[in-house]
């Protein structure tokens, strides 16, 4: 047992033991490391699905810590108050954590660091959630990147440090501080019956994430360039939920992809580019935090979007009953699995913001509540990209046709059969699960007829183009 003071490891979205710079720094101090998670206002504000998934992640991480001779201390309340209380209870001399990049987290963490340092506590933040800290990636003029491709060129040849190994053991403190019980937090309460439907589709924890990465780079990555656009094909890594909670690090993914690239894998570079797209989303969130709440291009502020999330058209979109099969299949996939294929996300976002002329914030908020792989930066950038009002956006006048997209990327109709019951002689179990996952108050059942389109594709497209006319975006 070391004579050094304990170190508090304040965990947020870094629920792993390997490649964890904050944990490594804490261990170097020589004393016991006490892992802590605080249920503060940022956790309370999470939507139903991401909060539930976070609870699953905490449960898995607590078990992983126990296997290392440690434990996870849970506290609820203001982060600074709880950290100060733990310092008093444990005699800790330092607090380490991994940096986050959204404005609320930055404001909180700056206040915590300043206050702890005034208390004489060594407070340190570390990298780990990203490969490239946003302030280290600059244009030739010293600014930030507003377009993805130049940023990709700027970072693609950078050295990314080899991932750190997990510690063999974590030395415990002489006495553990008190901890809340995770069950008492009721992280899945808002999920109601949907939790049991979604549960089999989650790959929870660091071990599951590493297994999935190994499976992906062992084969599917080779066809990723083509397969990633086919929603019925298991051709993507599906690591978004694990990256969102830090159950795997982006550097671990980068190096796995890089090894395959050097071996000649034809799909590896495209996958690595997607990792950099995630970095681009955080780059923008850090430099232009308004991207999470307002139109990134201010000229769109006067655009006549519908902002009412309860209209009949929008409710049909939310329920997966627009009468447009690609859109409906995608929404139903989300309710059953907690995720949605990326090609499908593009289609449902385009349909809502263009065919239904509804503000992207309505869709963003709905995804905030229903995605288990929710990520503040990726969700904001994705919605603004699809709507045309964001950085590096799809041209505002480009309106995806869900029917031609379905014909192109789901020729055999497997995606539709997987998620839509109506009209199917032998509906799949996954499609039937939708009716068990949705709120009872919707009063929707498998015997209901499939709806007619709430807005015809030609009609919706024409309506959007008319709205765009005479506006200089």
Image (cartoon, helix red, strand yellow):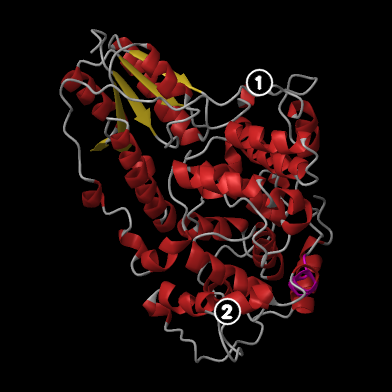
Magenta-colored stretch includes residue 385 = no
Q: Residue at x 50, y 78 (%)?
A: 429
User: What's the magenta region?
Assistant: 400-407
Which circle's residue, 2 or 1, is located before the other in the chain?
A: 1
Between 270 and 149, the residue placed more toward the observer is: 270
- Which of the 4 image quarters holds residue 332? bottom right
Q: Does 321 sit left or right of 342 as displayed?
A: left
Q: Is residue 271 above or below residue 95?
A: below
Between 283 and 124, the residue placed more toward the observer is: 124
* Residue 156 percent location from the top left of the image: 76, 30
Q: Is residue 38 above or below residue 431?
A: above
Describe the element under mark 1 as helix, strand or loop. helix
Mark 1 surroundings: few (<14), some (14-19) or many (≥20) residues within 10 A = few
Describe the element under mark 2 as helix, strand or loop. loop
Q: Does 316 sit left or right of 284 as displayed?
A: left
Q: Residue at x 46, y 56 (%)?
A: 202
Per the picture, the main secondary structure of the magenta-coloured stretch is helix
* Residue 349 percent location from the top left of the image: 65, 61
* Residue 194 percent location from the top left of the image: 39, 68
Q: Is residue 303 above or below residue 73?
A: below
* Residue 235 percent location from the top left of the image: 67, 57
Asked if the residue under mark 1 is in contact with the one under mark 2, i.e. CB atoms within 8 Å, the reply is: no
Provide the residue designation for mark 2: 321
Magenta-colored stretch includes residue 404 = yes
Between 293 and 271, the residue placed more toward the observer is: 271
Which of the labelled discs sits on residue 136, or is there none? 1
Marks 2 and 1, how far apart at CA? 45 Å
Q: Residue at x 71, y 77 (%)?
A: 413
Q: Is residue 138 above or below residue 321?
A: above
């Amino acid at each position: 047992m070391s004579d050094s003071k304990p170190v508090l490891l304040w965990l947020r979205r870094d629920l792993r033991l390997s490649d964890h710079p904050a944990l490594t720094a804490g261990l170097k101090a020589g004393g016991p490391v006490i892992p802590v998670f605080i249920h503060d206002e940022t956790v309370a504000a999470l939507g139903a699905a991401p909060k539930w998934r976070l609870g699953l992640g905490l449960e898995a991480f607590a078990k992983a810590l126990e296997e290392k001779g440690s434990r996870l201390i849970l506290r609820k309340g203001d982060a600074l108050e709880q950290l100060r209380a733990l310092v008093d209870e444990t005699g800790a001399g330092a607090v380490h954590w991994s940096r986050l990049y959204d404005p609320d987290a930055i404001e909180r963490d700056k206040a915590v660091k300043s206050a702890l340092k005034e208390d004489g506590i060594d407070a340190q933040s570390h990298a780990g959630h990203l490969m490239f800290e946003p302030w280290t990636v600059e244009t030739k003029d010293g600014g930030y990147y507003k377009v993805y491709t130049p940023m990709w060129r700027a970072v693609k040849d950078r050295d990314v440090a080899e991932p750190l190994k997990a510690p063999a053991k974590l030395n415990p403190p002489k006495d553990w501080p008190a901890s809340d019980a995770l069950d008492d937090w009721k992280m899945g309460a808002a999920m109601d019956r949907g939790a049991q439907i979604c549960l089999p589709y989650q790959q929870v924890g660091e071990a599951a994430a590493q297994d999935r990465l190994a499976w992906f780079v062992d084969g599917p990555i080779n066809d990723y360039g083509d397969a990633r656009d086919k929603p019925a094909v298991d051709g993507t890594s599906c690591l978004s939920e694990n990256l969102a909670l830090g159950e795997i690090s982006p550097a671990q993914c980068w190096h796995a992809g890089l090894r395959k690239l050097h071996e000649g894998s034809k799909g590896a570079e495209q996958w690595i580019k997607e990792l950099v797209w995630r970095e681009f989303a955080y780059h923008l969130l850090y430099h232009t935090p308004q991207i999470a709440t307002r139109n990134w291009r201010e000229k769109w502020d006067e655009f006549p979007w519908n902002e009412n999330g309860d209209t009949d058209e929008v409710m049909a979109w939310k329920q997966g009953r627009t009468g447009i099969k690609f859109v409906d299949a995608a929404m139903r996939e989300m309710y059953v699995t907690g995720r949605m294929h990326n090609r499908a996300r593009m289609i449902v976002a385009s349909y809502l913001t263009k065919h239904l002329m509804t503000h992207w914030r309505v869709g963003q908020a709905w995804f905030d509540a229903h995605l288990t792989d929710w990520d503040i930066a990726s969700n904001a950038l994705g919605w603004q990209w699809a709507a045309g009002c964001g950085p590096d956006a799809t041209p505002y006048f480009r309106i995806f046709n869900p029917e031609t997209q379905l014909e192109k990327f789901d020729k055999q109709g497997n995606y539709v059969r997987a998620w839509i019951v109506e009209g199917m002689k032998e509906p799949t179990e996954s499609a039937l699960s939708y009716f068990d996952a949705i709120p009872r108050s919707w009063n929707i059942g498998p015997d209901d007829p499939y709806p007619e389109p709430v807005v015809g594709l030609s009609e919706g497209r024409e309506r959007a183009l008319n709205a765009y006319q005479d506006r200089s975006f």
